[in-house]
Structures are given as C-alpha cells and as structure tokens.
Image (tube, rainbow, N blue to C red):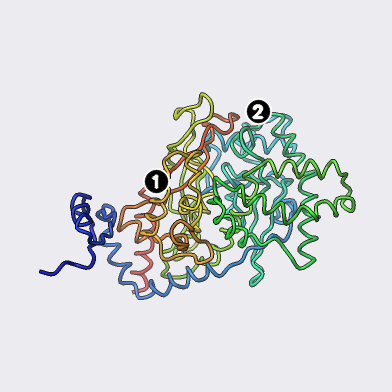
C-alpha cells in the first residue's frame, strides 16, 4: 500500500498526531454533527437552485463597496429624528424588556434632549410611552455601539459608497468607562456629550467637508485595510485606525477651525480627545461594515448573514435572503477580563451593534491580525490564530482587501453562512465590551462571546420555508 500524499482528520487528535508523526501532511477539521432538528431544512436549502449564485452575488456585492467619510451632522438632520424619538442597538425591544445599560442610556438621552430635568425622572416617561418611541439603529441605516442610543441632537458620522450613493451612519465615540453607550448617565457623561455636539461635531464637519470637497475624502475601507496590517482587528482594537484618521483630518481641523468659529484651544482639545481615544475609529468601522453588508440585502436564495446585533436582552441576526426579518434568542454574557473589582455577576448580557464588524469578517474573525487583543479580551495568541482559521469553516469566502499577514496574507473569512453554521455547529466569535447590568454603572470589562445557537436554526427554517414556497 502506498503512503497517502495527505490526510484529512475529522476525529480526535490521536489519529492525526500519529499520521503527522510519519511525515504525512494532515488537515485537521473541527467536525461536529449538524445542529439538532436541522437536517430537513438543511437538505431543502442545499438543493435550492438559487443558493449558490445568490451567495456568490451577496459576497461580491459586499466586497465591492468602498466606504468614504463624507459628512458629520446632527441625527435630526441626517436621520430625520424628531423630539422624543430614540434609536437603540440590536433588534426591536420595548422599555419593559430593556436591560439596565439600555435603560441607563435612554435615561441619559432623555435628559440630554431636555425631555426631563434629571435622568432619574425618565423612567416614568418611557413607561408611559406616549411621547417617546424606540427604534433599532439598523432600521435607519445606522449602527450604534453598546446601548447604541441615538437622540436628535447627537452628531453622526456619515459614510457613503461613491459608486451607489448609499449612506450609513454612526454616532461619535465617547471613549471608554463611564459613558452613555455603557449605560452611564452622570453629569460628566452628559457634559461630554454636549461638548461632542457643540465643539467636536462641528469641528469634524468642517474638516470632513474640506477634504471631501478637495476630492480626497477619508477612505474608511482603505484605513481598515491598513490597520489590519498594523495590529488592529477593528472592533476592540482600533489604535492604528484612529491615528490614521487623525493623520488625514488634522490639517483640515487646524486650517478650518477659524472659519467654523472655533479657537486653537478648541482644536487642541479635539485632537487631544480623539488621539487619546483608541476606540474612536470603531465608529467609522461599524458603518463601513454596515454599508458593505447592506449591499447584499434582499438577494433571494442567499443564506449569508447581513447583520448581527444585540440590545442587551436579545441577540438578533438578519439574512440576505429573508428581508428585514429578525431571528432572535437570548443574549449571552461574555467570558473575559473585568475592570477593578467587577466580576461576572456585574456584567450585563451582550449588547451593541458592533458585531457588524464580525458580520463583515473583522473583529473576532480577524483576531489573528491582532494577537495583542488577547490582553484585553482574554484567551491566548494561539487561540486568536485558531479563531480566524475556525471562522473560515462557516463563511462563504474571503476578503482580498482585508488580509491576515501571519496567515500568509489570506483574506479574512467573510460572509457568515447560516447553512454552514447549522451544519458544523460552529458559532461566530465576537470580541466585545461588557456593560454593567445596573443602569448607570458603565463599562465593567471586555471579553469573547458567541450568539445563542438557536437563532441559526430559526433563520434556516425561514430560508427553507421560502425555498419550499417557490416550489
């Protein structure tokens, strides 16, 4: 019997180790049985004549988008938010089911808008529900980190695909710790938000419009390409991306300040704030990813996930082939590292729209580009490398623009496939921050989390139903 040229191992490592010891190349596959009660739906979707081409089109549409920063403006102006209207992260939710950090952020937002004199008075306002409304950011082409609360006076980053004119939006990043997006609402939190609206927002608008009108708008997609080469994974590590954004905007910030009515001290404060806030670029990475994924929406037969989002109570996904329908399950508590004396009992279940980064193939999917991230979210460097490799088993393809140097510049795994998740049992890996479960606490840590497993069979059932209905 001749020696095989290569062996694929789907069992325990004992056999694979024995073969490798005989100098035979071994490919180890993390095989698991399909998720329970998915066999019939998997068979139906697998034989859908539209699926292969639909997924190819969805992936190509996502990869074909370029996201440029074209404006910064109040949410009332670019999203049409009226007084009393609030956006939030994740799938739809009502006040009675809202988590602590979401409630805290809504209370702070109500005080910011002058709907109440103090955040503590806002509970009655939301319980009555007569003069306020809640809506997911995703329903307005926006994304919001953590609680994701957006109010009319908040300033938004506006990203655009030059080829189509489509736009997406995200608020300005407040920094870490006790901030509104983590559910904090102390006076200093509201003062910072007012400064973002009165000083930083208008300064950024002048700078962004200046470079845009000069024909050199900030190319967020290109920055993402570079930052992945520089040790960022664009979810919990954005240091290189933030510094490149400053590089592109600083000259225009300085030269345009006087025309916008601001002093050199205002410019210095803005540069100091952004430069000292490593997460600032996250709020460009998120809408850049949403802009790309929205291009893949509404492709009949596609099994590609186009949104993963959490509101602190529910985790929801949307799929290219099922329209705007949300498939939801209970959000999970992240496993990671905690700040100070905080521990697992202090953490709220996962929250935020920032998992749009993983949906697009970065963040947890690109952990191999940022081995230093394990010092923030836990795990080890080998874990980071293994995670990126494992995500290839549940994705449709790779992104040739966003590559992983340590993996021979292979593209990041892109296009989460509902059928592959159900067939392998492997869940998407997400890097996340952790908010305190009690309103007003703020950030308590950071870690790793996966979606609740049951949402993928739900999505698969929705896809199978549509396939059967087409006959």
Residue 121 in picture, x, y percent from top left? 67, 29
For residue 263, side relative to residue 81 (left or right): right
Q: Residue furthest top?
A: 341
Instruction: Note whether 48 is above or below 16 in the view shown.
Output: below
At 74% across and 41% down in the image, what residue appears? Answer: 272
Between the C-alphas of marks 2 and 1, the distance is: 43 Å
Which secondary structure, mark 2? helix
- The residue beneath circle 2 is 120
The quadrant of the image that shows the N terminus is bottom left
Single out the mark in the foreground, 2 or 1: 1
Q: Work out whether residue 342 or residue 291 is closer to the camera in this orientation and state it.
A: 342
Q: Quadrant of residue 104?
A: top right
Quadrant of the snapshot with the C terminus: bottom left
- Is 321 left, or right, of 293 in this rendering? left
Position of 361 relative to 46 (above/below): above
Residue under the image location 18 percent in, 67 percent down = 4
> Residue 295, percent across and down?
55, 67
Task: Assess whether mark 1 and mark 2 are in contact (beta carbons under 8 angstroms).
Answer: no
Q: Please give the label number shown on residue 383.
A: 1
Q: Residue at x 39, y 46 (%)?
A: 383
SS under mark 1: helix
Q: Which quarter of the figure has residue 180?
A: top right
Of residue 361 and residue 160, the one placed in the foreground of this image is: 361
Percent from the top left, x then y, of residue 449? Answer: 43, 43
């Amino acid at each position: 019997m001749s020696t095989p040229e290569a062996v694929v191992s789907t069992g325990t490592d004992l056999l694979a180790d024995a073969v490798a010891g005989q100098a035979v190349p071994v490919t180890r596959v993390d095989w698991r049985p399909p998720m329970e009660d998915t066999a019939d739906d998997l068979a139906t979707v697998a034989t859908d004549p539209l699926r292969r081409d639909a997924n190819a089109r969805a992936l190509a549409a996502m990869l074909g988008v370029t996201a440029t920063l074209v404006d910064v403006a109040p949410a009332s102006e670019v999203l049409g938010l009226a007084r009393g209207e609030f956006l939030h992260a994740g799938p739809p939710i009502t006040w009675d089911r809202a988590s602590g950090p979401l409630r805290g952020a809504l209370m702070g937002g109500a005080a910011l808008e002058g709907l109440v004199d103090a955040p503590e008075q806002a509970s009655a306002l939301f319980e009555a529900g007569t003069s306020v409304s809640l809506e997911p950011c995703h329903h307005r082409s926006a994304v919001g980190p953590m609680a994701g609360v957006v109010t009319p006076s908040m300033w938004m980053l506006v990203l655009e695909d030059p080829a189509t004119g489509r736009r997406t939006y995200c608020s300005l990043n407040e920094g870490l710790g006790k901030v509104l997006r983590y559910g904090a609402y102390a006076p200093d939190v509201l003062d910072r938000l007012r400064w973002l609206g009165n000083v930083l927002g208008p300064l950024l608008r002048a700078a962004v419009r200046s470079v845009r009108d000069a024909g050199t708008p900030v190319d967020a997609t290109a920055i993402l390409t570079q930052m992945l080469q520089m040790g960022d994974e664009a979810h919990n590590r954005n240091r290189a991306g933030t510094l490149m954004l400053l590089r592109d905007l600083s000259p225009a910030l300085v030269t345009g300040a006087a025309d916008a009515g601001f002093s050199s001290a205002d410019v210095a404060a803005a540069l100091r704030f952004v430069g000292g806030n490593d997460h600032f670029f996250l709020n460009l990475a998120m809408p850049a990813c949403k802009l790309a994924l929205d291009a893949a929406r509404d492709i009949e037969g596609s099994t590609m996930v186009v949104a993963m989002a959490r509101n602190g109570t529910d985790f929801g996904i949307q799929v290219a082939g099922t329209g705007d329908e949300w498939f939801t399950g209970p959000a999970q508590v992240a496993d990671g590292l905690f700040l100070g004396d905080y521990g697992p009992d202090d953490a709220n279940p996962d929250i935020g729209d920032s998992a749009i980064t993983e949906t697009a193939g970065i963040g947890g999917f690109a952990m191999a580009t940022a081995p230093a991230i394990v010092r923030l979210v836990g795990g080890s460097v080998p874990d980071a490398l293994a995670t990126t490799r494992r995500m290839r088993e549940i994705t449709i393809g790779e992104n040739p623009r966003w590559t992983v140097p340590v993996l021979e510049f292979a593209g990041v795994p892109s296009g989460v496939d509902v059928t592959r998740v159900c067939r392998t049992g492997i869940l998407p890996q997400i890097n996340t921050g952790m908010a305190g479960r009690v309103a007003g606490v703020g950030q308590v840590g950071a870690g790793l989390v996966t979606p609740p497993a049951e949402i993928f069979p739900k999505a698969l059932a929705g896809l199978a139903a549509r396939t059967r209905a087409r006959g």
